[in-house]
Amino acid sequence: MMKNKVKELRARFGYSQETLGKEAGATRQTIAAIEKGDYVPSLLLALNICRAFSLPMEEVFWLEEEKK
Amino acid sequence: MSLKRKACFHLALYGLACWTLISFMEAAPRIAQFFQTEGSGSFELNITPFLLFTVCTALYIYTEKKKRNGKKHRLVPDEFEEQDERERMMTAKACRSSYIAVYFSLPAAAVLLLFYPLIQPHLPFFPILLIFILMMIQHLAYVFTFHKHGKNSGS
């Protein structure tokens, strides 16, 4: 299961969902879906989000074992 | 315009288009007779559905044009809202379920058409009705799936 801290980073960097969406090339709704964990972004979008925060991938997205 | 409102508009347009065609079909033999007798005699044609259809289409085009601002191609259906990868994914899933709906309903419609000679005296416009029902099934399958995935992915 893919986890992320987009919401936390967005708050730290003072970005709105709209701004981050524009930076990463996605809509506000998509950013909201990623934050809630309802949507797993493509590699390209994930890299664009990381670039918007100037952070490496592993600090924004990571994999977590699913509970059985 | 929201997806729900757009879907309602489309269904209303389908209904009105169906009504227009049915009224034309009912008048067609008399219209043919009118032209065969070189204009002598008369025919009756209910133009109410046609007028309603024209008004609704004009209203729809006006509201959509304001939103679109001429950016999109007119031949692409309005339901295709693909601003990013998530919306493209939603469209793909909606198209898939729409295809499956048509895949099953089209043969069912073909079977129903076998009974047309029996139905014809009571419902002469049965084939028109069937085509519009198919269109509605396809549209509803698309809209419901798009809405479901939209809700599940946070929009």
Image: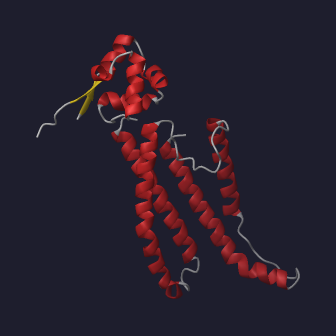
Along the viewing direction, whichever of B15 and B116 lies nearer the viewer: B116
Side of B6 where B149 appears, left or right: left
Along the viewing direction, whichever of B128 and B56 lies nearer the viewer: B128
Q: Is residue B120 above or below residue A60?
A: below
Q: Position of residue B90 (x, y in %)?
A: 42, 45
Q: Quadrant of residue A47?
A: top left
**Measuring 47% from the left and 20% from the top, which residue is drawn there?**
A19
Along the viewing direction, whichever of B128 and A21 lies nearer the viewer: A21
Q: Position of residue B113 (x, y in %)?
A: 50, 80
**Measuring 66% from the left and 62% from the top, which residue is drawn there?**
B49
Q: Position of residue B94 (x, y in %)?
A: 43, 51
Quadrant containing the C terminus of chain A in the rendered view:
top left
**Measuring 79% from the left and 84% from the top, which residue is drawn there?**
B33
**Measuring 48% from the left and 84% from the top, which residue is drawn there?**
B114
Side of A64 where B144 appears, left or right: right
Q: Position of residue A56 (x, y in %)?
A: 33, 19
